[in-house]
Amino acid sequence: MHTNDQLSAQVSVIIPTLNAGLEFEQLLVKLQEQTHLPHEIIVIDSESTDGTCELAREAGVRLLQVKRSEFDHGGTRNQAATLATGNILVFMTQDAMPHDNRLIEYLIKPLVNQNKISVLDGEMFEDNKIALSYARQLPRHDASLPERLARESNYPSKSHIQSIDQLDSLGIKTFFCSNVCSAIKRETFDEMGQFQEPVIFNEDLFMAAKCILNGYKVAYCAEAEVAHSHNYSIKQQFKRFFDNGVSMRLNPLITPYSAVGGAGSKLVRSQVKGLTASGSWYLVPHLIVESAAKLIGFKLGMYHKSLPKFFIKRISMHPLIWGQLDRKGGTVETPPAPTTLNQ
């Protein structure tokens, strides 16, 4: 049953696309079958050539188009958000498939019911400071075993709240969030200055960090589920983590927290344990090589300013965005200073 606050929540779903494929039609259908129907669905496309725009038009959703060379994980989403009319913004990726028709209902649950006590996965909490939520990601049917173990580790079956109180123990993991499927109050999104732009990676984590450092909280909603996973090659993982390292280096407010908590090593240990327990120990050497590639890529990204520009573009997963980073001097905006009001 929907509460009055849930009924008054107008949800704008924003999906950046690039050659989304035939499954994109199924995603749009599933969104239009939700128990909490979106107020609007906005697709912002980067010059797709596979019929993605035609699928969006046929589905009757709002279509925006940008040049592929101008795509930016933060700025492109901001363009769509600026035109959105909902009071809750839901950000999704083109390959996130809702598990059922209650995804939006569960995802926005922590963001509504202001100044009330609510229940999230059996636990009581005050939700008036929760400004951002994100969904659980389930591995797709074709996911490799290491990828399945990674999803299970990063997206457990139990919901939880992330706040500034956990910084000392969790470090940067406190800011973990994913725009594969997330929701944020529109007023908070604007208060935080929208997503940082240009940004090569981690726009979702940086938004969560801005919220938490300003006294807000982030809710992980295990009941809200999407199918989403990737079987990246070692080369692709290297490139992803190079971009990850670049984004961290360009955000000095976040960098100090990356050394606390040891999230990366904990994930590898849990994967090794899972592979061994399942009798798939023969996959451990590949996992070790992949983990080394991630670490090397991340370290190179952190020190990318010492590398030749032509080399940077070759090892980046998003080479087109470097023109935007160069024009802005390679910096990102600093999150607003924490306010005493929200402490």
Image (tube, rainbow, N blue to C red):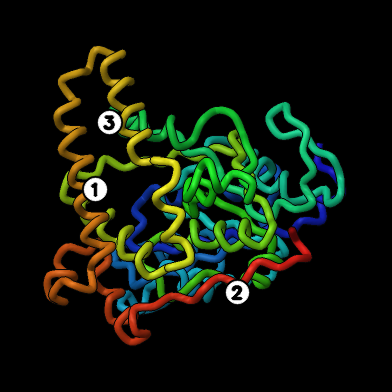
Please name which of the two marks, 3 or 1, marks the residue nearer to the observer.
Answer: 1
Mark 2 or mark 1: whose residue is earlier in sequence = 2
Q: Nearer the viewer, residue 234 or 329?
A: 329
Q: Position of residue 309 (x, y in %)?
A: 16, 77
Q: Residues within 10 Å of mark 2 (few under 14, many from 20)?
A: some
Relative height, residue 215 to residue 127 (above, below)? below
* Eye-nearest disc, 3 or 2: 2
Q: Amino acid at mark 2?
A: Gly
Quadrant housing the N terminus: top right
Quadrant in the rendering for residue 325: bottom left
Query: Please, is residue 325 above or below residue 242 in the view?
Result: below
Horizontal arrangement in the rendering, residue 79 relative to residue 84 (left or right): left
- In the picture, the disc for residue 193 is 2
Q: In this rendering, would 299 be left or right of 228?
A: left
**Is residue 111 among what the camera can see?**
yes
Q: What label does residue 144 carry, if any?
A: 3
Point 49% across, 74% down: residue: 64
Sequence-wise, the earlier of marks 3 and 2 is: 3
Give the image location of residue 53, x and y in percent: 41, 66
Location of mark 1 (residue) = 295
